[in-house]
Amino acid sequence: MSYGGQLTDWLITQTNEFKAAVPIAGIANLVSYNYMTYYNQYEEMEFGQFLHQGNLMDVAWERSALKHVAAAHTPTMLMHGENDNDVPIAEAEQFFIALKDVGTEAIFVRYPREGHGLAETKHQIDSIDRCIAWYEKHFPKPGAEGVTNVQP
């Protein structure tokens, strides 16, 4: 969740080594994130200047997964709370649309009433069940047709 989601978004745009991904509450676009969150001074604290100063806007865009989405081919299930004040759900929405635009298998699970993390028990159970099903779909069990067991 959060940075783990941001890192997952990034990784699937940098390599196709993963069989499936589940970014949760990830930041896909550092530029839009800066202007939609109440952490809008993060870049000033991190880089010593505001996003609009110098070339920081270009640096932020270059380090955003959304810029590199055309290279993403990993099946991705995005999860996000609709009331997330830390990472606005628009981050997942734009990445989901971009993944679909480039032909990457993607689904988007939105959790109503949830913020940055899941508090409702039924949502926690649902997210675990969905993750298991997503990975089982993309990781064939040993012994299945076309799957070989390799002994170390």
Image (cartoon, rainbow, N blue to C red):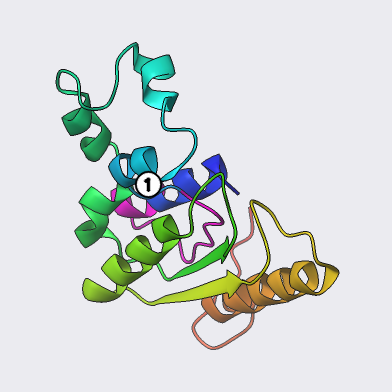
Residue lying farthest to the right in this orientation: 121
* 116 relative position to 23: left or right: right
* Foreground of the two, 106 or 134: 106
Q: Position of residue 120 (x, y in %)?
A: 80, 66
Report the span colored magenta. 10-26
* 49 displayed left or right of 92: left
Relative to residue 22, is residue 131 depicted above or below? below
Left or right, 42 with respect to 58, comes to right
- Give the residue number, with chain letter if any, for mark 1: 10
Q: As drawn, which residue projects farthest toward the top?
A: 48
Q: At which x and y percent is residue 33?
A: 38, 44
Looking at the rendered structure, the secondary structure element under dot 1 is: helix
Residue 45 shown in magenta: no
Q: Measuring 31% from the left and 52% from the top, which residue is drawn there?
A: 13
Q: Main secondary structure of the magenta part?
A: loop
The residue at 29%/21% (across/down) is: 50
Q: Is residue 21 magenta?
A: yes
Total tally of numbered discs in the picture: 1
* Mark 1: amino acid: Trp
Q: Residue at x 43, y 47 (%)?
A: 27
Residue 1, how many percent across, how many down? 60, 49
Q: Is residue 14 left or right of residue 119?
A: left
